[in-house]
Amino acid sequence: MANKRTTLAKKNKNLHLRNRDLVCPNCGEPNSPDTDFCESCGVPLGNMAATDPVKSIRSAAWAYRRIFSGPPSSLILVGVWVMLGPWLPVVPLIMAYQIANDASLGIGGLLELSLEFLWLVLCGLLLYRITTNYWSHPRKT
Ligand SMILES: [Zn+2]
């Protein structure tokens, strides 16, 4: 009986170990396979993070936080500039065009202009942030 209990305990221990064999690619912490995010560092794990809408937002937020909080790699820096950089000259042109051609802007036009302005500020802030992060941190080679 005692022997059987020991075997069972050993079996449970093995099962427990097997249940935590999803190793986090970021910090190396073992997680259970049904976990969607690393219990230690919050990295998205598994498929759920990509299919569930709320979790995919969390997953994307994590990726963006990582991109904009630490020193980015050159590839990320270039990628963000390619993605957001063109807006910096384009948005003011669109706004100027609207102001010049729409004598009566109205509420809708003003709303549109303020949204464009917000987008311009957001792009500028993100680009400023990632660029200063890139230059102020020692770069990974
Ligand atoms: Zn982790």
Image (tube, grey):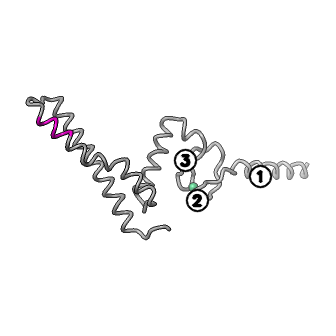
| Left or right, 135 with reference to 88 | right
* Mark 1 Cα shell of 10 Å, populated few (<14), some (14-19), many (≥20): few
Q: CA distance from mark 1 to mark 2?
A: 23 Å
Residue shown at 32%/50% (left/top)? Answer: 85
Viewer-nearest of labels 3 and 1?
3
Secondary structure beneath label 2: loop
Q: CA distance from mark 2 to mark 3?
A: 12 Å
Q: CA distance from mark 3 to mark 1?
A: 26 Å
Q: Give the labeled residue for mark 3.
A: 44
Picture coordinates of residue 134 (x, y %)? 39, 63
Secondary structure beneath label 1: helix
Q: Amino acid at mark 2?
A: Cys
* Mark 3 Cα shell of 10 Å, populated few (<14), some (14-19), many (≥20): many
| Left or right, 40 with reference to 123 | right
For label 2, being within 8 Å of ligand 1 is answered: yes
Residue 138 among magenta residues: no
Q: Give the labeled residue for mark 2.
A: 27
Q: Amino acid at mark 1?
A: Lys
Residue 98 among magenta residues: yes
Give the mark nearer the N terminus: 2 vs 3.
2
Q: Give the labeled residue for mark 1.
A: 13
The magenta region covers 94-100
> Does residue 2 lie above or below 104 as drawn?
below
The part of the image, by quadrant, that contains residue 51 is top right
Q: Nearer the viewer, residue 2 or 7?
A: 7
Q: Determine the main secondary structure of the stretch shown in magenta.
A: helix
Viewer-nearest of labels 1 and 2?
2
Q: Amino acid at mark 3?
A: Pro
Picture coordinates of residue 30 (x, y %)? 65, 54
> Does residue 117 lie above or below 139 as drawn?
above
